Amino acid sequence: MKKTLVGFVLFGLAAQSYAQDSELEQSALQLNTITTAVPFLLIAPDSRAGALGDAGVASSPDANSMHWNVAKLAFVEKEMGVSVSYSPWLRQLVPDINLSYVGGYKKLGDDNAIGASLRYFSLGDIKFTDNQGNPIGDFNPAEFAFDLGYSQKFGENFSGGLAVRYIYSNLTGGIDVSGANTRSGKSFAVDVGGFYTKDDATVFGQDAIINAGLNISNIGAKIAYTNDAVKDFIPINMRLGQSLTFVLDDYNTFSILTDFNKLLVPTPPIYATDDSGQPIIDPTTGEPEIESGKNPDVPIVTGIFQSFSDAPGGMSEELKEINISAGMEYWYNKQFAVRTGYMHESATKGNRKYFTVGAGLKLSVFGLDVSYLISTTQQNPLANTVRFSLMFDFEAFKKQNDTSSN
């Protein structure tokens, strides 16, 4: 792919951030999208949750729980499992951008488990040029994150979990931009999660399983790509949700899932301007004056707490910053599943709205999940793209080998 440096920057923003709808009526809506560094950390990596409208904080535990809620791993049924997922990105425009994900877990006992995952986001091959169009280098921008997690039960129904994450983002390969030497962005972060499950509940006279989950992810240091640049928040995110599974009989189950998401980073303020539309600069600080909202250049902990009350539009805007994901899942005989879901984001906060569908198949040793996304508002990077996840059950594999050897 041949692109100028400016084109690459614009493309990178489109590929990594949640884009705004270009057809919104600007006169009717005040756009105020929250942006962060390394937004690839928020992309749903697996096809099961991808088919449920990106709902997963309280779904039944599996090998992808490291992304959604590490606390779930303490309640996983199998001894050990691994999942491999692949998601094409902007496939309708370019062929070589994709997200790959590997996640797994190992039970340490009846009450605890460890997990690990690796996600790799490739932005394809880029040819950099200067402002005159002269080639200055070729590079393959990429980002990855490596996680380690631990989950522990605290009683029969509740568990907690903690994960640590190393984040690496190399978008320019060290090429000078406007005289400034760029570098890769690096950060460490942690996830903190809690999970509640009750598998002997009764709802409307029907046997049911009730799950609830809370996960705060990517609590970590800001990232910068040059030595003198202002550092950007990484996507610290709070996810709260539930899952209600009706056990219809020995062969059929039906689940309803709902997730609520909110970025715990500062909302961009509205800056004061003069009659000509130019920013008004505070003579004391040398910074633009804020007309409404709060200063976003704050420490990490301050930014987390400030994110609940800093929207320029007040509480009504704060509520718009909550994304809603909902999904339904039907299993037959714990072997075949069909899924659908919907994700909603406010028009002033990114305007992502899409339906999802998918299916799952479990055999004795491995399982296969597929998902498909149908965007309803704009060109979504995953629109009309089939995603795959392959899951391996090592306990079943071991039993199969023991049977064959006997």
Image (tube, grey):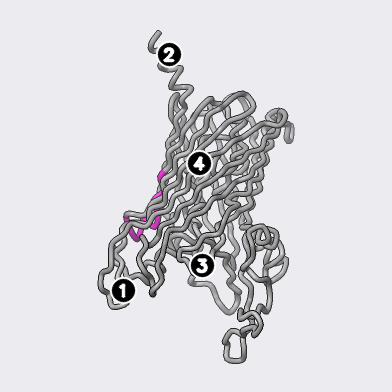
Instruction: Tell me if mark 1 has few (under 14), some (14-19) or many (20+) residues whose alpha carbon lies within 10 angstroms of its own.
Output: some
* Residue shown at the point (53%, 35%) measured from the top left: 115
4 versus 340 height, above or below:
below
Q: Are marks 4 and 2 in contact (CB under 8 Å)?
A: no
As drawn, the residue found furthest toward the bottom would be: 275
Q: Secondary structure at mark 1?
A: loop
**What residue is disc 4 on?**
48
Reading the image, the residue beneath label 3 is: 20
Q: Give the residues drawn in magenta, as a range.
A: 86-95
Q: Nearer the viewer, mark 4 or mark 2?
A: 2
- First in sequence, mark 1 or 3: give its number: 3
Q: Position of residue 253 (x, y in %)?
A: 59, 32
| Residue at x 58% of width, y 57% of height | 344
Number of callouts: 4
Asked if labels 4 and 3 touch by Cβ distance under 8 angstroms, the answer is no
Query: Residue at position x 63%, y 64% from top?
Result: 266
Percent from the top left, x then y, of residue 77?
Answer: 57, 27
Q: Earlier in the sequence, mark 4 or mark 1?
A: 4
Pointer 1: what residue? Answer: 130
Kindly report the distance in space between the C-alpha atoms of the residues bearing marks 1 and 2. 62 Å
Q: Earlier in the sequence, mark 2 or mark 3?
A: 3
Quadrant (top left, top right, bottom left, bottom right) of the N terminus: bottom left
Q: Residue at point 54% right, 63% down? A: 232
Which amino acid does the dot numbered 3 rest on? Gln
| Mark 3 element type | loop
Q: Is disc 4 placed on a helix, strand or loop?
A: helix
Amino acid at the residue labelled 1 = Asp
Give me the C-alpha separation between circle 3 and circle 4: 26 Å
Q: Position of residue 358 (x, y in %)?
A: 47, 43
Q: CA distance from mark 1 to mark 3?
A: 28 Å
Given residues 219 and 337, the one toward you in this image is 219
